[in-house]
Image (tube, rainbow, N blue to C red):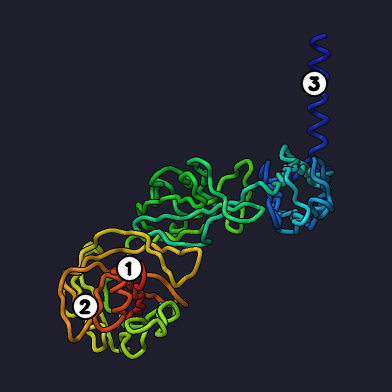
């Protein structure tokens, strides 16, 4: 009996082998198709279900799909009945679109099944995927920005909103896991690390959380970090499921920079119009600068520079002498001119050994002061962005200073400089 069973097994193996060979005895490779992940979440809008082929298709093919679950087609969602894989490609998507006006209180589930494979293909174990259609009590999670930079350290914000509208404040402290997307070229532990764990931290009763990343090393071709929010039951992706971060390291100020513009002048003018009275925005007293104004940072390290002003405009009334400049820290500053909800940028804070904080040709109060910088790129040009907010004005904005005693929170000056060769 054992011999008979063995014989049958051997014969079966020959049959299988013959089925996978062509007439010339060469192996015929079958292409396998799978959904890339087992589960998705969808609040409003649409979600793309990704189909993966283990090798590029030689011809364009269509794979039928069927739907099951509690979600009803044409009531809760719409989607095509096939996924088209184009010749030469190994990925295809099926878009599932939510019918927003029919969103009710209950969550619903849609199961998408792959149908019969075309000739030359086979369906793998990832033959189906589930889409959780959130009810109006669900939560949408999204990075605040699609792109950012990493200097010495970075804080990247994630916000939560209710599907029904408004911010969602977590009832108790909570973490949302994040992942390093495979499209990243930077390597965790070599080029960056997570300061406080691989998640966005939310404090109780807050709708905004953050993930902290620390710079380790800059390497050409390995400076791209893509963070992705991990899936979570009851949560769906908003507009920004990922953020792409360019790893720059410390801001390098060395060199000569030429004045370009007061970048937030229009915001200051609209926020503190002359109608408020004396001491608010007045074009005649607001600092004037010249295209011949230059500043130079000299040194071997971002930690300390010698600052030399070459100024003919009113900036000379603040930066009034050559002095030592020392790196103090990095911090996030609110850029009020970029609107609401508030926008924060990571800046490097330097202590200037001596400036005239009265920002005046007539009055002089010399002391050390904090000035912040960020090197960025605007319209493909390198820009040194200066935030000057540690000042006690006597010639302009006197009403603001007298009332607030806090120019950083109310009337910072955002000044752009460009490299001298631009």
Q: Nearer the viewer, mark 3 or mark 2?
A: 2
Which picture quadrant has residue 298? bottom left
Alpha carbon distance from label 1 to label 2: 15 Å
- Residue 244 picture location, percent across and down: 50, 59
> Residue at (34%, 79%) from the top-left corner?
417
As displayed, is residue 18 above or below residue 283? above
Q: Earlier in the sequence, mark 3 or mark 2?
A: 3
Q: Secondary structure at mark 2?
A: loop
Q: Earlier in the sequence, mark 1 or mark 3?
A: 3
Residue at mark 3: 9
Residue 183 seen: yes
* Mark number, residue 358: 2
Residue at mark 1: 408
> Residue at (45%, 53%) from the top-left corner?
186
Left or right side of 199 for 294: left
As displayed, is residue 140 above or below residue 26? below
Alpha carbon distance from label 3 to label 2: 94 Å
* Mark number, residue 84: none
Q: Nearer the viewer, residue 84 or 346?
A: 346
Q: Nearer the viewer, residue 82 or 259?
A: 259
Circle 2 Cα neighbour tier, 10 Å, few/some/many (<14 / 14–19 / ≥20): many
> Residue at (40%, 70%) from the top-left corner?
376
> Residue at (43%, 58%) from the top-left corner?
223
Q: Residue furthest top?
A: 1
Q: Assess whether mark 2 and mark 1 are in contact (beta carbons under 8 angstroms).
A: no
As displayed, is residue 346 above or below residue 49? below
Q: Earlier in the sequence, mark 1 or mark 2?
A: 2
Q: Nearer the viewer, residue 207 or 323?
A: 207
Circle 1 Cα neighbour tier, 10 Å, few/some/many (<14 / 14–19 / ≥20): some
């Amino acid at each position: 009996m054992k011999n008979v069973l063995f014989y049958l097994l051997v014969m079966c193996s020959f049959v299988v082998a013959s089925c996978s060979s062509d007439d010339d005895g060469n192996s015929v490779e079958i292409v396998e198709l799978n959904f890339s992940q087992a589960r998705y979440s969808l609040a409003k809008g649409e979600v793309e279900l990704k189909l993966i082929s283990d090798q590029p298709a030689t011809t364009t093919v269509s794979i039928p799909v069927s739907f099951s679950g509690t979600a009803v087609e044409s009531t809760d969602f719409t989607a095509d009945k096939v996924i088209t894989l184009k010749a030469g490609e190994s990925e295809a998507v099926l878009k599932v679109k939510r019918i927003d006006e029919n969103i009710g209180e209950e969550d619903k589930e849609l199961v998408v099944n792959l149908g019969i494979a075309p000739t030359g293909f086979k369906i793998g174990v990832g033959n189906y995927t589930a889409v959780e259609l959130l009810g109006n009590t669900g939560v949408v999670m999204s990075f605040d920005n699609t792109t950012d930079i990493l200097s010495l350290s970075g804080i990247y914000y994630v916000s939560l909103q209710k599907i029904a509208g408004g911010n969602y404040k977590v009832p108790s402290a909570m973490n949302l896991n994040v992942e390093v997307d495979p499209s990243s070229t930077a390597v965790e532990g070599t080029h960056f690390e997570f300061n406080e764990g691989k998640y966005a931290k939310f404090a109780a009763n807050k709708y905004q959380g953050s993930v902290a990343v620390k710079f380790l090393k800059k390497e050409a071709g390995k400076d791209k970090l893509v963070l992705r929010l991990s899936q979570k039951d009851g949560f769906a992706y908003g507009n920004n499921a990922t953020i792409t971060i360019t790893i720059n390291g410390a801001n390098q100020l060395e060199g000569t920079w030429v004045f370009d513009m007061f970048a937030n002048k229009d915001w200051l003018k609209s926020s503190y119009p002359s109608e408020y009275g004396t001491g608010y925005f007045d074009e005649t007293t607001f600092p004037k600068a010249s295209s011949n104004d230059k500043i130079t940072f000299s040194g071997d390290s971002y930690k300390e520079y010698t600052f030399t002003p070459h100024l003919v405009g009113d900036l000379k009334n603040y930066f009034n002498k050559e002095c030592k400049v020392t790196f103090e820290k990095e911090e996030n500053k609110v850029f009020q001119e970029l609107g609401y909800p508030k926008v924060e940028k990571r800046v490097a804070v330097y202590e200037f050994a001596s400036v005239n904080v009265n920002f005046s040709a007539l009055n002089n109060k010399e002391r050390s002061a904090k000035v912040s910088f960020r090197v960025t790129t605007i319209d493909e040009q390198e820009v040194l962005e200066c935030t000057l907010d540690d000042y006690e004005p006597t010639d302009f904005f006197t009403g603001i200073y007298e009332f607030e005693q806090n120019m950083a929170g109310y009337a910072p000056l955002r000044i752009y400089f460009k490299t001298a060769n631009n």
